Image (cartoon, helix red, strand yellow):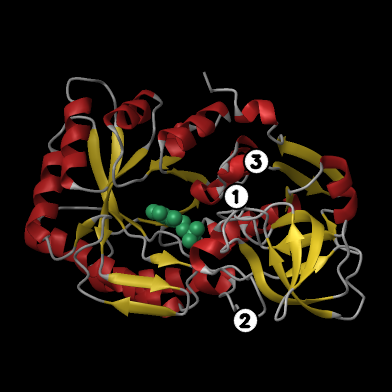
Amino acid sequence: MLEIGGIKAIDLAKKYGTPLCVYDENRLRGRLKEFKDNFRCDEFDTDVIYASKAFNCKAMIRLIDEYDCCLDVVSGGELYTAVKAGYDCSKVFFHGNNKTPAEIQMALQNGVGTIVVDNAMEADELIRQISGTDYKVNVYLRINPGIEAHTHKYIVTAHVDSKFGFSLLDEEEIIETVQKLNQTEGITVEGLHAHIGSQIFDQQAFVEEIRKMFAFASKLKEVYGIDVCGINLGGGFAALYTDEDKPIPVPQVCETILSTCREENEKAGGFIKRILIEPGRSIVAEAGYNLYTIGYIKKTPNKLYAFADGGMADNIRPALYQAKYDAVIAGKEDQPAYADYTIAGKCCESGDILIQSIALPEVKTGDILAMKTTGAYGYSMASHYNKLPLPAVVFAKDGEDREVIARESYDHLISLEK
Ligand SMILES: *Cc1c(COP(=O)(O)O)cnc(C)c1O
Protein backbone atom coordinates (compact mmCIF):
# COMPACT_ATOMS: atom_id res chain seq x y z
CA MET A 1 0.00 0.00 0.00
CA LEU A 2 1.79 3.12 -1.23
CA GLU A 3 2.39 5.61 1.54
CA ILE A 4 3.99 9.00 1.11
CA GLY A 5 5.38 10.53 4.28
CA GLY A 6 3.52 7.93 6.29
CA ILE A 7 0.13 8.60 4.70
CA LYS A 8 -1.69 6.36 2.27
CA ALA A 9 -1.62 7.83 -1.24
CA ILE A 10 -5.29 6.94 -1.56
CA ASP A 11 -6.16 9.01 1.50
CA LEU A 12 -4.21 12.00 0.18
CA ALA A 13 -6.08 11.74 -3.14
CA LYS A 14 -9.37 11.57 -1.28
CA LYS A 15 -8.58 14.53 0.94
CA TYR A 16 -7.16 16.92 -1.66
CA GLY A 17 -8.56 15.61 -4.93
CA THR A 18 -6.55 14.81 -8.06
CA PRO A 19 -4.42 15.53 -9.93
CA LEU A 20 -2.25 16.13 -6.90
CA CYS A 21 1.47 16.74 -6.41
CA VAL A 22 2.75 15.21 -3.19
CA TYR A 23 6.24 15.51 -1.72
CA ASP A 24 7.67 13.18 0.88
CA GLU A 25 9.14 15.92 3.04
CA ASN A 26 11.62 13.64 4.78
CA ARG A 27 13.07 12.66 1.43
CA LEU A 28 13.51 16.33 0.54
CA ARG A 29 15.20 16.87 3.87
CA GLY A 30 17.29 13.73 3.51
CA ARG A 31 18.64 14.80 0.15
CA LEU A 32 19.42 18.32 1.33
CA LYS A 33 21.28 16.92 4.32
CA GLU A 34 23.12 14.45 2.10
CA PHE A 35 24.38 17.24 -0.15
CA LYS A 36 25.29 19.47 2.79
CA ASP A 37 27.11 16.66 4.64
CA ASN A 38 29.04 15.41 1.64
CA PHE A 39 29.85 18.57 -0.23
CA ARG A 40 32.42 19.86 2.16
CA CYS A 41 36.17 19.65 2.68
CA ASP A 42 38.91 21.44 4.57
CA GLU A 43 40.56 22.99 1.52
CA PHE A 44 37.59 24.96 0.23
CA ASP A 45 34.65 26.99 1.35
CA THR A 46 31.80 25.02 -0.15
CA ASP A 47 28.17 25.83 -0.71
CA VAL A 48 25.24 23.90 -2.10
CA ILE A 49 22.99 26.16 -4.13
CA TYR A 50 19.50 24.83 -4.79
CA ALA A 51 18.48 25.50 -8.40
CA SER A 52 14.94 26.53 -7.60
CA LYS A 53 13.59 26.37 -11.12
CA ALA A 54 13.18 22.63 -10.52
CA PHE A 55 10.48 23.43 -7.94
CA ASN A 56 10.12 26.91 -6.54
CA CYS A 57 7.59 27.80 -3.87
CA LYS A 58 7.75 29.41 -0.44
CA ALA A 59 7.59 26.13 1.49
CA MET A 60 10.48 24.70 -0.53
CA ILE A 61 12.56 27.83 -0.09
CA ARG A 62 12.00 27.69 3.68
CA LEU A 63 13.39 24.16 3.66
CA ILE A 64 16.39 25.35 1.69
CA ASP A 65 16.91 27.99 4.35
CA GLU A 66 16.60 25.46 7.15
CA TYR A 67 19.45 23.41 5.66
CA ASP A 68 21.52 26.51 5.12
CA CYS A 69 21.73 26.12 1.37
CA CYS A 70 22.07 28.99 -1.07
CA LEU A 71 19.41 29.63 -3.69
CA ASP A 72 19.60 29.92 -7.46
CA VAL A 73 16.88 31.95 -9.17
CA VAL A 74 16.47 32.72 -12.84
CA SER A 75 13.71 35.30 -12.91
CA GLY A 76 12.04 38.12 -11.04
CA GLY A 77 9.21 35.72 -10.17
CA GLU A 78 11.50 33.19 -8.54
CA LEU A 79 13.28 35.99 -6.70
CA TYR A 80 9.97 37.48 -5.56
CA THR A 81 8.98 34.11 -4.10
CA ALA A 82 12.28 33.94 -2.21
CA VAL A 83 11.74 37.45 -0.83
CA LYS A 84 8.21 36.55 0.27
CA ALA A 85 9.51 33.37 1.89
CA GLY A 86 11.74 35.56 4.05
CA TYR A 87 14.89 34.13 2.50
CA ASP A 88 18.13 36.05 3.04
CA CYS A 89 18.83 37.39 -0.46
CA SER A 90 22.54 37.71 0.18
CA LYS A 91 22.59 33.95 -0.42
CA VAL A 92 20.79 34.24 -3.75
CA PHE A 93 22.54 33.60 -7.07
CA PHE A 94 20.70 35.23 -9.95
CA HIS A 95 21.11 33.46 -13.30
CA GLY A 96 19.70 33.88 -16.77
CA ASN A 97 20.76 34.92 -20.25
CA ASN A 98 18.34 37.81 -20.55
CA LYS A 99 17.72 39.35 -17.16
CA THR A 100 15.68 42.43 -17.87
CA PRO A 101 16.76 45.84 -16.56
CA ALA A 102 13.80 45.62 -14.17
CA GLU A 103 14.97 42.24 -12.88
CA ILE A 104 18.50 43.55 -12.34
CA GLN A 105 17.08 46.52 -10.46
CA MET A 106 14.94 44.20 -8.36
CA ALA A 107 18.00 42.08 -7.56
CA LEU A 108 20.01 45.11 -6.42
CA GLN A 109 17.15 46.54 -4.38
CA ASN A 110 16.62 43.26 -2.58
CA GLY A 111 20.29 42.76 -1.80
CA VAL A 112 20.88 39.74 -4.00
CA GLY A 113 24.37 38.55 -3.10
CA THR A 114 25.56 37.24 -6.43
CA ILE A 115 24.65 37.93 -10.03
CA VAL A 116 25.85 35.42 -12.57
CA VAL A 117 26.57 37.60 -15.56
CA ASP A 118 25.77 35.78 -18.77
CA ASN A 119 26.94 38.08 -21.57
CA ALA A 120 28.72 41.33 -22.31
CA MET A 121 25.63 43.48 -22.70
CA GLU A 122 24.28 42.29 -19.37
CA ALA A 123 27.57 43.33 -17.76
CA ASP A 124 27.12 46.83 -19.22
CA GLU A 125 23.56 47.04 -17.92
CA LEU A 126 24.65 45.97 -14.42
CA ILE A 127 27.47 48.53 -14.45
CA ARG A 128 25.07 51.22 -15.61
CA GLN A 129 22.61 50.44 -12.83
CA ILE A 130 25.08 50.12 -9.98
CA SER A 131 27.18 53.17 -10.81
CA GLY A 132 26.59 56.03 -8.39
CA THR A 133 24.68 53.84 -5.92
CA ASP A 134 25.68 52.15 -2.66
CA TYR A 135 24.70 48.69 -3.88
CA LYS A 136 27.23 45.91 -3.61
CA VAL A 137 27.13 42.67 -5.50
CA ASN A 138 29.39 39.71 -6.24
CA VAL A 139 29.62 38.52 -9.80
CA TYR A 140 30.32 35.14 -11.30
CA LEU A 141 30.85 35.05 -15.03
CA ARG A 142 29.00 32.28 -16.83
CA ILE A 143 31.44 30.44 -19.02
CA ASN A 144 30.57 28.02 -21.76
CA PRO A 145 33.37 25.48 -21.34
CA GLY A 146 32.51 23.54 -24.50
CA ILE A 147 31.24 20.49 -22.65
CA GLU A 148 27.68 19.39 -23.03
CA ALA A 149 26.35 16.55 -20.95
CA HIS A 150 22.87 15.11 -21.06
CA THR A 151 21.99 11.75 -19.61
CA HIS A 152 24.52 9.11 -20.60
CA LYS A 153 26.60 11.01 -23.09
CA TYR A 154 28.75 14.03 -22.84
CA ILE A 155 30.58 15.73 -25.62
CA VAL A 156 33.56 17.98 -25.51
CA THR A 157 33.25 20.39 -28.36
CA ALA A 158 34.24 23.85 -29.35
CA HIS A 159 30.55 24.66 -29.10
CA VAL A 160 30.53 28.39 -29.60
CA ASP A 161 26.86 28.97 -30.36
CA SER A 162 25.15 28.42 -27.02
CA LYS A 163 22.77 31.13 -25.89
CA PHE A 164 24.30 30.81 -22.42
CA GLY A 165 27.53 32.30 -21.24
CA PHE A 166 30.83 33.49 -22.63
CA SER A 167 32.56 31.00 -24.87
CA LEU A 168 35.99 30.03 -23.63
CA LEU A 169 37.16 30.67 -27.15
CA ASP A 170 36.27 34.32 -26.82
CA GLU A 171 38.94 35.19 -24.32
CA GLU A 172 39.20 38.80 -25.27
CA GLU A 173 35.57 39.47 -24.47
CA ILE A 174 35.86 37.70 -21.13
CA ILE A 175 38.94 39.68 -20.12
CA GLU A 176 37.40 42.96 -21.17
CA THR A 177 34.18 42.20 -19.30
CA VAL A 178 35.90 41.13 -16.09
CA GLN A 179 38.10 44.20 -16.09
CA LYS A 180 35.15 46.52 -16.69
CA LEU A 181 33.17 44.89 -13.89
CA ASN A 182 36.06 44.96 -11.44
CA GLN A 183 36.69 48.62 -12.11
CA THR A 184 33.13 49.42 -11.06
CA GLU A 185 32.57 50.49 -7.47
CA GLY A 186 30.28 47.96 -5.77
CA ILE A 187 31.06 45.02 -8.06
CA THR A 188 33.49 42.22 -7.23
CA VAL A 189 34.09 39.46 -9.74
CA GLU A 190 34.40 36.52 -7.41
CA GLY A 191 34.54 33.66 -9.85
CA LEU A 192 33.57 31.63 -12.84
CA HIS A 193 30.42 29.61 -13.36
CA ALA A 194 29.45 26.84 -15.75
CA HIS A 195 26.50 24.49 -16.05
CA ILE A 196 27.02 21.71 -18.54
CA GLY A 197 23.69 19.92 -18.72
CA SER A 198 21.17 17.84 -16.85
CA GLN A 199 20.42 14.29 -15.75
CA ILE A 200 24.15 13.52 -15.98
CA PHE A 201 25.10 9.91 -15.18
CA ASP A 202 28.78 10.07 -16.11
CA GLN A 203 30.90 11.76 -13.48
CA GLN A 204 33.73 12.07 -15.98
CA ALA A 205 31.75 14.98 -17.47
CA PHE A 206 32.20 16.88 -14.19
CA VAL A 207 35.89 15.97 -14.11
CA GLU A 208 36.37 17.42 -17.61
CA GLU A 209 34.44 20.51 -16.62
CA ILE A 210 36.56 21.05 -13.51
CA ARG A 211 39.81 20.70 -15.46
CA LYS A 212 38.69 23.23 -18.04
CA MET A 213 37.50 25.70 -15.42
CA PHE A 214 40.67 25.51 -13.35
CA ALA A 215 42.83 25.77 -16.46
CA PHE A 216 40.97 28.88 -17.49
CA ALA A 217 41.09 30.45 -14.02
CA SER A 218 44.85 29.84 -13.99
CA LYS A 219 45.24 31.45 -17.36
CA LEU A 220 43.28 34.49 -16.20
CA LYS A 221 45.65 34.83 -13.28
CA GLU A 222 48.92 34.13 -14.99
CA VAL A 223 48.43 35.75 -18.36
CA TYR A 224 46.08 38.59 -17.52
CA GLY A 225 46.65 39.20 -13.83
CA ILE A 226 42.97 38.64 -13.06
CA ASP A 227 42.28 36.96 -9.72
CA VAL A 228 39.14 34.94 -9.19
CA CYS A 229 38.70 32.86 -6.07
CA GLY A 230 35.52 30.88 -6.77
CA ILE A 231 34.36 28.22 -9.17
CA ASN A 232 30.69 27.31 -9.52
CA LEU A 233 30.22 24.01 -11.33
CA GLY A 234 26.44 24.20 -11.85
CA GLY A 235 24.01 21.32 -11.46
CA GLY A 236 22.88 18.42 -13.57
CA PHE A 237 23.06 15.56 -11.06
CA ALA A 238 20.83 12.73 -12.19
CA ALA A 239 17.72 11.37 -10.49
CA LEU A 240 16.23 7.89 -10.67
CA TYR A 241 13.10 7.85 -12.82
CA THR A 242 12.98 4.19 -13.81
CA ASP A 243 15.09 1.15 -13.01
CA GLU A 244 17.15 1.87 -16.14
CA ASP A 245 18.59 4.95 -14.44
CA LYS A 246 21.71 4.58 -12.33
CA PRO A 247 22.40 7.97 -10.81
CA ILE A 248 25.77 8.49 -9.20
CA PRO A 249 25.21 8.39 -5.42
CA VAL A 250 25.51 11.87 -3.91
CA PRO A 251 28.47 11.04 -1.62
CA GLN A 252 30.38 9.62 -4.57
CA VAL A 253 29.80 12.50 -6.97
CA CYS A 254 30.62 15.02 -4.23
CA GLU A 255 33.84 13.18 -3.46
CA THR A 256 34.82 13.03 -7.13
CA ILE A 257 34.16 16.72 -7.59
CA LEU A 258 36.00 17.80 -4.48
CA SER A 259 39.00 15.53 -5.01
CA THR A 260 39.33 16.67 -8.62
CA CYS A 261 39.10 20.27 -7.47
CA ARG A 262 41.81 19.65 -4.87
CA GLU A 263 44.12 18.12 -7.47
CA GLU A 264 43.58 20.91 -9.96
CA ASN A 265 43.93 23.58 -7.31
CA GLU A 266 47.22 22.13 -6.18
CA LYS A 267 48.53 22.19 -9.73
CA ALA A 268 47.35 25.76 -10.08
CA GLY A 269 49.01 26.97 -6.90
CA GLY A 270 46.01 26.91 -4.59
CA PHE A 271 44.37 30.24 -5.36
CA ILE A 272 40.79 28.92 -5.62
CA LYS A 273 39.08 29.21 -2.23
CA ARG A 274 35.42 28.51 -2.90
CA ILE A 275 33.67 25.69 -4.77
CA LEU A 276 29.95 25.70 -5.48
CA ILE A 277 27.44 23.28 -6.96
CA GLU A 278 23.84 23.90 -7.99
CA PRO A 279 21.71 20.77 -7.81
CA GLY A 280 18.06 21.20 -8.71
CA ARG A 281 16.51 17.99 -10.01
CA SER A 282 18.46 15.66 -7.74
CA ILE A 283 17.13 17.40 -4.63
CA VAL A 284 13.43 17.37 -5.45
CA ALA A 285 12.71 14.81 -8.18
CA GLU A 286 12.58 11.55 -6.24
CA ALA A 287 10.64 13.02 -3.32
CA GLY A 288 7.71 13.90 -5.61
CA TYR A 289 4.68 11.90 -6.69
CA ASN A 290 1.84 12.90 -8.99
CA LEU A 291 -1.46 11.27 -8.11
CA TYR A 292 -4.15 10.92 -10.76
CA THR A 293 -7.59 9.35 -10.76
CA ILE A 294 -8.09 6.95 -13.62
CA GLY A 295 -11.14 7.74 -15.72
CA TYR A 296 -12.01 5.70 -18.77
CA ILE A 297 -10.25 2.62 -20.03
CA LYS A 298 -10.09 2.16 -23.78
CA LYS A 299 -8.90 -0.74 -25.87
CA THR A 300 -7.64 -0.26 -29.42
CA PRO A 301 -6.24 -2.99 -31.68
CA ASN A 302 -2.72 -2.43 -30.34
CA LYS A 303 -3.07 -0.58 -27.09
CA LEU A 304 -4.84 -0.63 -23.79
CA TYR A 305 -5.30 2.92 -22.55
CA ALA A 306 -5.95 4.11 -19.02
CA PHE A 307 -6.81 7.81 -18.97
CA ALA A 308 -5.50 10.08 -16.20
CA ASP A 309 -7.31 13.20 -15.00
CA GLY A 310 -4.22 15.34 -15.66
CA GLY A 311 -1.46 15.12 -18.20
CA MET A 312 0.89 17.40 -20.10
CA ALA A 313 -0.53 20.46 -18.34
CA ASP A 314 0.84 19.28 -14.99
CA ASN A 315 3.79 17.26 -16.33
CA ILE A 316 5.05 18.19 -19.75
CA ARG A 317 8.27 16.20 -19.57
CA PRO A 318 7.03 13.05 -21.34
CA ALA A 319 5.59 15.09 -24.21
CA LEU A 320 8.50 17.52 -24.32
CA TYR A 321 11.40 15.11 -24.23
CA GLN A 322 10.08 11.58 -24.05
CA ALA A 323 10.88 11.41 -20.35
CA LYS A 324 10.16 8.00 -18.85
CA TYR A 325 8.41 7.41 -15.54
CA ASP A 326 7.47 4.55 -13.29
CA ALA A 327 4.07 4.32 -11.62
CA VAL A 328 1.89 2.13 -9.43
CA ILE A 329 -1.81 1.77 -8.82
CA ALA A 330 -2.13 2.74 -5.17
CA GLY A 331 -3.49 -0.16 -3.15
CA LYS A 332 -2.76 -2.74 -5.89
CA GLU A 333 1.02 -2.87 -5.48
CA ASP A 334 0.91 -6.51 -4.47
CA GLN A 335 -1.28 -7.67 -7.32
CA PRO A 336 0.35 -9.35 -10.31
CA ALA A 337 0.65 -7.53 -13.62
CA TYR A 338 -2.44 -7.92 -15.75
CA ALA A 339 -1.47 -6.07 -18.94
CA ASP A 340 0.71 -3.36 -20.43
CA TYR A 341 -1.13 -0.07 -20.23
CA THR A 342 -0.58 3.22 -21.96
CA ILE A 343 -1.28 6.03 -19.52
CA ALA A 344 -2.69 8.96 -21.47
CA GLY A 345 -3.47 12.41 -20.19
CA LYS A 346 -6.68 14.33 -20.87
CA CYS A 347 -5.21 17.13 -22.97
CA CYS A 348 -6.05 17.65 -26.61
CA GLU A 349 -2.74 16.52 -28.06
CA SER A 350 -2.01 13.02 -29.30
CA GLY A 351 1.41 13.47 -27.70
CA ASP A 352 -0.15 13.78 -24.26
CA ILE A 353 0.96 10.33 -23.12
CA LEU A 354 2.32 10.21 -19.58
CA ILE A 355 3.67 6.65 -19.85
CA GLN A 356 3.96 4.82 -23.17
CA SER A 357 3.84 1.34 -21.74
CA ILE A 358 3.77 0.02 -18.22
CA ALA A 359 2.81 -3.36 -16.78
CA LEU A 360 0.09 -2.87 -14.16
CA PRO A 361 -2.51 -4.94 -12.34
CA GLU A 362 -5.98 -4.64 -13.79
CA VAL A 363 -6.78 -0.93 -13.80
CA LYS A 364 -10.30 0.18 -12.98
CA THR A 365 -12.06 3.49 -13.22
CA GLY A 366 -11.54 5.36 -9.97
CA ASP A 367 -8.14 3.83 -9.25
CA ILE A 368 -5.39 6.17 -8.07
CA LEU A 369 -2.33 6.10 -10.27
CA ALA A 370 0.82 7.32 -8.51
CA MET A 371 3.59 8.45 -10.84
CA LYS A 372 6.99 8.48 -9.17
CA THR A 373 9.89 10.95 -9.35
CA THR A 374 7.72 13.82 -10.51
CA GLY A 375 9.17 16.36 -8.09
CA ALA A 376 11.42 18.24 -10.53
CA TYR A 377 10.30 20.28 -13.52
CA GLY A 378 6.74 19.04 -13.08
CA TYR A 379 4.73 21.65 -11.24
CA SER A 380 7.34 24.24 -12.16
CA MET A 381 6.74 23.65 -15.87
CA ALA A 382 2.96 23.28 -15.53
CA SER A 383 0.67 25.20 -17.84
CA HIS A 384 -3.00 26.03 -18.16
CA TYR A 385 -3.34 24.24 -21.47
CA ASN A 386 -6.98 23.31 -22.09
CA LYS A 387 -7.67 25.67 -19.20
CA LEU A 388 -6.93 23.00 -16.64
CA PRO A 389 -6.44 24.50 -13.17
CA LEU A 390 -3.04 23.78 -11.60
CA PRO A 391 -3.05 20.94 -9.06
CA ALA A 392 -2.54 21.40 -5.34
CA VAL A 393 0.86 20.61 -3.83
CA VAL A 394 1.08 18.80 -0.51
CA PHE A 395 4.05 18.02 1.75
CA ALA A 396 3.66 14.82 3.78
CA LYS A 397 5.85 13.97 6.75
CA ASP A 398 5.63 11.50 9.64
CA GLY A 399 1.95 10.84 9.05
CA GLU A 400 0.95 14.49 8.70
CA ASP A 401 0.15 16.40 5.56
CA ARG A 402 0.07 20.10 4.79
CA GLU A 403 -1.02 21.85 1.66
CA VAL A 404 1.79 24.16 0.49
CA ILE A 405 0.10 25.32 -2.70
CA ALA A 406 -3.67 25.29 -3.01
CA ARG A 407 -5.44 23.88 -6.03
CA GLU A 408 -6.53 26.49 -8.54
CA SER A 409 -10.23 27.04 -9.00
CA TYR A 410 -12.03 27.99 -12.19
CA ASP A 411 -12.34 31.47 -10.72
CA HIS A 412 -8.55 31.69 -10.39
CA LEU A 413 -8.31 30.69 -14.02
CA ILE A 414 -10.29 33.70 -15.23
CA SER A 415 -9.43 36.09 -12.45
CA LEU A 416 -7.30 38.35 -14.65
CA GLU A 417 -9.63 38.38 -17.59
CA LYS A 418 -11.40 41.69 -18.32
C1 LIG B 1 18.94 24.30 -14.47
C2 LIG B 1 20.18 24.74 -13.83
C3 LIG B 1 20.68 24.06 -12.72
C4 LIG B 1 20.06 22.83 -12.15
O1 LIG B 1 20.05 21.77 -13.04
P1 LIG B 1 19.54 20.32 -12.53
O2 LIG B 1 19.68 19.47 -13.74
O3 LIG B 1 18.13 20.49 -12.11
O4 LIG B 1 20.41 19.92 -11.41
C5 LIG B 1 21.82 24.57 -12.12
N1 LIG B 1 22.43 25.68 -12.58
C6 LIG B 1 21.97 26.35 -13.67
C7 LIG B 1 22.67 27.55 -14.12
C8 LIG B 1 20.84 25.90 -14.33
O5 LIG B 1 20.40 26.56 -15.40
Q: Give the foreground label among 1 and 2.
A: 1
Residue 356: image quadrant is: bottom right
Query: In the rendered image, which residue does mark 2 sit on?
Result: 244
Taking the image as shown, residue 312 lies to the left or right of residue 17, namely left
The 10 Å Cα crowd at callout 2, few under 14, some 14 to 19, many 20 or more, is few
In the rendered image, residue 77, in percent from the top left (x then y), is placed at 46, 34
Q: How far apart in space, not on screen, are marks 1 and 3 (Cα)? A: 8 Å
Q: Earlier in the sequence, mark 1 or mark 3?
A: 1
Q: CA distance from mark 3 to mark 2?
A: 30 Å
Side of 167 where 319 appears, left or right: right
342 w.r.t. 126: above or below:
below
Image height of 361 relative to 58, above or below: below
Q: Position of residue 70 (x, y in %)?
A: 49, 45
Q: Please, what secondary structure does the residue beneath circle 1 have?
A: loop
| Residue 102, above or below 271 | above
Label 1 vs 2, first from the N-terminus: 2
Answer with the quadrant where ligand 1 appears in the image: bottom left
Identify the residue at horizontal 66%, vertical 69% (top origin). Answer: 355
Q: Position of residue 258 (x, y in %)?
A: 44, 68
Amino acid under label 1?
Ala
x 41%, y 43%: residue: 74
The answer to the question of whether label 1 and label 3 lie on touching residues, with beta carbons closer than 8 A, is: no
The mark found on residue 146 in the picture is: none
Q: Nearer the viewer, mark 3 or mark 2?
A: 3
How far across and down, in percent of the image, does residue 254 sit? 51, 68
Q: Which residue is mark 1?
A: 313
Category of crowding for the residue at label 3, using alpha-carbon neighbours closer than 10 angstroms: few (below 14), some (14–19), many (at least 20): many
Q: Are marks 3 and 2 in contact (CB under 8 Å)?
A: no
Residue for badge 3: 390
Q: Nearer the viewer, residue 30 or 159?
A: 159
Count all numbered tags in the image, as a single digit.
3
